[in-house]
Image (cartoon, rainbow, N blue to C red):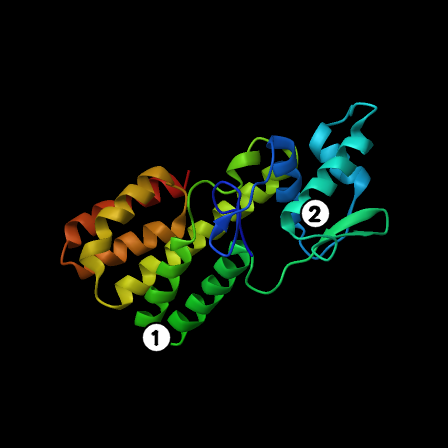
Amino acid sequence: MEFRILGELEVEEGGRAVALGGARQRALLTNLLLHAGEVVSADRLIDDLYGAQPPATAAKSLQAHISRLRKALGGEQRLRTRGGGYVLELSEGELDLERFSLMLEEGRRSLAAGKAELAVATLEQALSLWRGPPLADVAYAEFAQGEVARLEELHFAVVEELVDARIALGRHGEVVGELERLVAMHPLRERLRASLLLALYRSGRQAEALDAYQGARAILVQ
C-alpha cells in the first residue's frame, strides 16, 4: 500500500486508488500519517478534527470514522486501538514523506562525498515525489500548520542541495535562471544567494555576480 501526503492525500493498493471518504475522514488519516507508528489519543484527534468546542457526538463520530478507515485500509492490523487512542502501522517505504526524507539524506551524503552525479539523480528522484503543496487537503487546519512549514522547508532543502550538485557538475549556466527566480521569491535565503553568486561567477558573468553580491548585502544587512 502507498500513502502520499506530498500533495493531496492519496492511498493506492495494487495500483488502484483507495476510497478515503469525506473531508473529515481524510483529515483524520492525514493526522495519523503524520504520527505513523505513534499512539494518538482520541482526545487529541477530536480537538484536531473539531476544534476547541467539539459537538457532543464527536467521540461517536470519531469511532465511526476510525471504523470506516479500517475497512478501507485493511483492518485492525493496520489501524490499531491502543491506550485510549489509535496507532497507524506502516511498513518501511509506504509513506512518500519517509522516502523523500531518506533521499534527501542520501543526496546530501553523496554530494559531501564528491559524488555529485549520484546526488543529482537522487535529489531529482526525491523532487518527483512532490505533487503539489504538502498536506493540501488540510493545509488550513490548525493541527497541520507546523507540519506544512516543516515539509516546505524540507522541499527547499532538496532544491538547494540539487542546485549545488548541478553546480558541482559544471552545470552552472543552466541553474542561473532558476536561482534568480528562487532568490526573487525568497530574498532572505542566504544559501540560494551564495549559489547564485557562484553560478554567475563560474559562468563568466563576473559583473552580474558583483551586482548580485551588492544587492544581497544591501538586503541581508538591514
- First in sequence: mark 2 vs mark 1: 2
Q: Which residue is mark 2?
A: 70
Look at the numbered disc 1 and give the secondary structure of its residue.
Answer: loop
- Image location (x, y in percent) of residue 54: 78, 25
Compared to 195, does 20 lie above or below? Answer: above
Compared to 42, does 14 lie above or below? Answer: below
- Image location (x, y in percent) of residue 71: 68, 46
Residue type pointed to by label 1: Lys
Tell whether 209 sits left or right of 69.
left
The residue at the point 54 percent across, 35 percent down is 137
- Judging depth in this view, the residue of 48 and 9 nearest the camera is 9
Compared to 208, does 58 lie above or below? Answer: above
Give the crowd class for mark 1: few <14, some 14-19, many >=20 residues within 10 Å.
some
- Judging depth in this view, the residue of 63 and 216 nearest the camera is 63
Tell whether 47 sits left or right of 83.
left
Q: Nearer the viewer, mark 2 or mark 1?
A: 2
Question: Looking at the figure, which quarter contains the C terminus?
Answer: top left
- Judging depth in this view, the residue of 17 and 113 nearest the camera is 17
Compared to 53, does 93 lie above or below? Answer: below
- Image location (x, y in percent) of residue 75: 71, 52
* Occupied quadrant, residue 145: top right
- Judging depth in this view, the residue of 84 and 168 nearest the camera is 84
The residue at the point 13 percent across, 58 percent down is 204
One can see residue 200 in this view: no
Residue type pointed to by label 2: Arg
Tell me the tag on residue 115: 1
The residue at the point 81 percent across, 38 percent down is 43
Give the crowd class for mark 2: few <14, some 14-19, many >=20 residues within 10 Å.
some
